[in-house]
Image (tube, grey):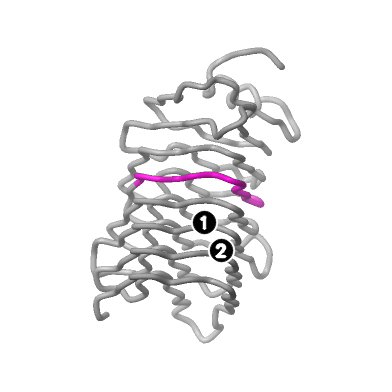
Amino acid sequence: GGGWCTLPAAVQEANALPGPDTVTIAVTQAIDLNSGITITDDLTIRSGLDTMASVNRTGTTPIFVVADPSLPAVTFERLDISGGQSAEAGSAVWLERAGEATFLGCRIHDCSSAGGGAIGVGTYSGNILVDGCGLVDNSSTSGGAAIAVYGNPVDQRGVLEIRGSAFNSNTATAASEGGGAIAVLNTFWDVVISDTSFVYCSDAGGGGGAIKLDANTSDPITARIERCGFTWCSAAAE
């Protein structure tokens, strides 16, 4: 309604209003959540400050869950997201049933899950863009310490595009699906990564100290990786 309220209340109101909405965070102190937030309609959550707006979660479910048969499009802009923990996947943002998902100038850090320590793709997602983001100190007990894509794209093929971003000190801790930073484990995705750095990312045994692409079918994942740097990334043998 254009007024002031808590972040969960603002998202709940946006969910109830048909069509795209924008929630602007204009408080300088960190927002501490004791429960996750579910998004069911097209939504942008952005900082209205000169700097990032901080959202922190203490608990064992994802911070943001995008889950609706209508496949809502979501944008996260200039947010500092931390503290997510999940026994499943995507502890900062879990794209269970989502449309286009865009991350602009965000920092996602200190999150952990069973797959996709920061961002996880579940049943469906539209194309995913990560632009100018930092993913730092995230971990997974399975694949994709920072980002894990398990599910199908909404269209016949989907695109995971990452540009101008930094992946630092992300760790896949178990000898499972691999990907010390990124794991794409579904055949119907194209991966485009440019002008991005990977530093001190590691995998304990699934392969891919920084990136693991494993379709497990005869239809291969296509990938283009250009102008990227890999420093001190490591993987144990599969």
Q: Quadrant of residue 13?
A: top right
Pointer 1 residue: 123
Q: Where is residue 211 in the image (x, y as percent from the top left)?
A: 43, 71
In the rendered image, the quadrant that contains the N terminus is top right
* Image mark for residue 104: none
State the CA–CA distance, disc 2 to disc 1: 6 Å
Camera-side residue of 217 and 31: 31
Residue nearer the viewer, 50 or 136? 50
**What residue is at 66 percent from the left and 36 percent from the top?**
43
Residue 57 magenta-drawn?
no
Dot 2 falls on a residue whose secondary structure is: strand
What crowding class fits label 1: few (fewer than 14 Cα within 10 Å), some (14-19), or many (20 or more)? some
Residue shown at 57%/36% (left/top)? 39
62 relative to 15 in the view: left or right: left
What type is the residue that disc 1 sits on? Thr
Residue 228 horizontal/vertical position (percent):
53, 71
Label drawn at residue 152: 2
Task: Name the residue type under label 2.
Answer: Asn
Q: Which range of residues does the magenta coloring cover? A: 99-111
Residue at the image position 33 percent from the left and 70 percent from the top: 232
